[in-house]
Amino acid sequence: MSLSYRQPGVVLTDRRFTVPLDHANPSGETIELYAREAVAGEKADQDLPWLVYLQGGPGFGANRFIGRPAWLGRALKDYRVLLLDQRGTGASTPANRQTLPLRGGPAEQADYLTRFRADSIVRDCEAIRPKVTGGAPWTVLGQSFGGFCTVAYLSVAPEGLDTALITGGLPSLDAHADDVYRAAYPRIERKVAAHYSRYPQDVERARRIADHLLTHDVVLPNGYRLTVEAFQSLGILLGGSEGSHRLHFLLEDAFVRTPRGHELSDAFQEEAQSLLSYAGHPLYALVHEAIYGQDARPTDWSAERVRAEFPQFDAAKTLAGDEPLLFTGESVHPWMFDCDPALRPLRETAELLAARTDWSPLYDPARLAANEVPVAAAVYHDDMYVDTGHALTTARAIRGLRTWVTDEFEHDGVRAGGPRVLDRLLSLARDEA
């Protein structure tokens, strides 16, 4: 039974659905999906078209909004909105170190997780759409990985879509994970250089913290082992609109003087563990590289292997000289499954996923070339998370897709400039229609 309740300016309804675990076997095992319906309070009784929101990730549940912030307020002017927790996230049969042992051992867990990619998420959407819209097509808004899912939707079931809106999420249609990370490391290096240009005092601060971590065994309060590589991975912040400033504030008071000498402060450690822990989104670490798997080649810890091609990211070599320490960004590495207590029990499962060679294609270039769904995409110039070159190549491969290329926002533009971003995409899509 659905439960409705109110927040300022909005009526919310909890929705739950049962879908097949494997859509190729619809009579087999099922899982539960959760979604939150949102409608403007003053329009709660109106018959409105639907917009389904696909969150970025992979591995994150849909935003838990309070009221009508960011892009949601703009969307509620025209739509009922369905905020879907993609399978394995949020309240949709969550997959984590606590629940995955129900599947069996690492081999069974890895087999299970192969069904948590974009193709299955699209099939979930199509399974629940008739129950939500009565069969009418809906608009999809895909942020980041949600955009990857949207391109898969256009490939698999375009008949379910009225309009497709993508923000920072046009994937390469055929790149291997190695290609993705070879393009990523130079972008990350540019972001780090821009950060140090803005905050030159952080050069010495970052080097000092890295040197401390190379010579001390630091375990954070939650049990996370803070290595220098883990510290470098805090560069993931640099892909967001406020990330450079957040990183600066984290670094500026990292040390305190104690009876044992200078140590990393409790405040620094508390903030670092909140940024580094995968406890709330373990699927991000488990299937992150699998979202690029489309052929017989394993992903094989691609980000870690490709990093070796960029020796300037080696902290020990950097500290032996006088160069600024380079942070890293949106990538997953095998050492994370040793450092993070939320991931340690899943190390063997992750190894098995990294070794798989039976990934199926996620996108249909022929169908995309014949696309008839109005599509608009925001492409963020020099996006740290999604390569702009890859995104624009894909944009040209999807018939009728209209792009808005901007350097006004970073990857989180749909949050930072939500109403304007959504307005622009709706305008582009409607002009195309």
Image (spheres, rainbow, N blue to C red):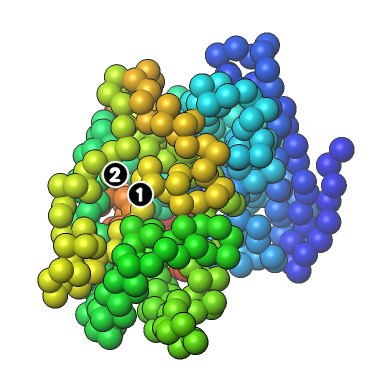
411 horizontally vs 178: left or right: right
Please give the name of the residue rendered at 32% of the width and 50% of the height, measured from the top-left corner.
Answer: 386
The reply to whether dot 2 and dot 1 touch (C-beta < 8 Å) is yes
Q: Secondary structure at mark 2?
A: helix
Comparing 85 with 72, the one in front is: 85
Q: Secondary structure at mark 1?
A: loop
Q: Amino acid at mark 2?
A: Ala
Please give the name of the residue rendered at 68% of the width and 11% of the height, measured from the top-left corner.
Answer: 27
The residue carrying pointer 1 sits among few (fewer than 14), some (14 to 19) or many (20 or more) residues within 10 Å by Cα, namely many
Residue 376 shows in this picture: no
- Vertical arrangement, residue 336 with respect to residue 399, above or below: below
Give residue 422's position: percent from left, percent from top.
48, 58
Label at residue 410: none
Image quadrant in which you'd find residue 303? top left
The residue carrying pointer 2 sits among few (fewer than 14), some (14 to 19) or many (20 or more) residues within 10 Å by Cα, namely many
* The C terminus lies in quadrant: top left
Give residue 268's position: percent from left, percent from top.
49, 75
Give residue 163's position: percent from left, percent from top.
48, 41
Comparing 112 with 261, the one in front is: 261
Q: What residue sits right under mark 2 in the picture?
A: 303
Please give the name of the residue rendered at 62% of the width and 32% of the height, measured from the top-left corner.
Answer: 100
User: Which of the two discs, 2 and 1, labels the residue nearer the N terminus?
Assistant: 2
Q: Amino acid at mark 1?
A: Ser
Comparing 86 with 13, the one in front is: 86
Marks 2 and 1, Cα distance to the nearest angstrom? 6 Å
Please give the name of the residue rendered at 28% of the width and 85% of the height, measured from the top-left corner.
Answer: 201
Label at residue 331: 1
Q: Residue furthest front?
A: 260
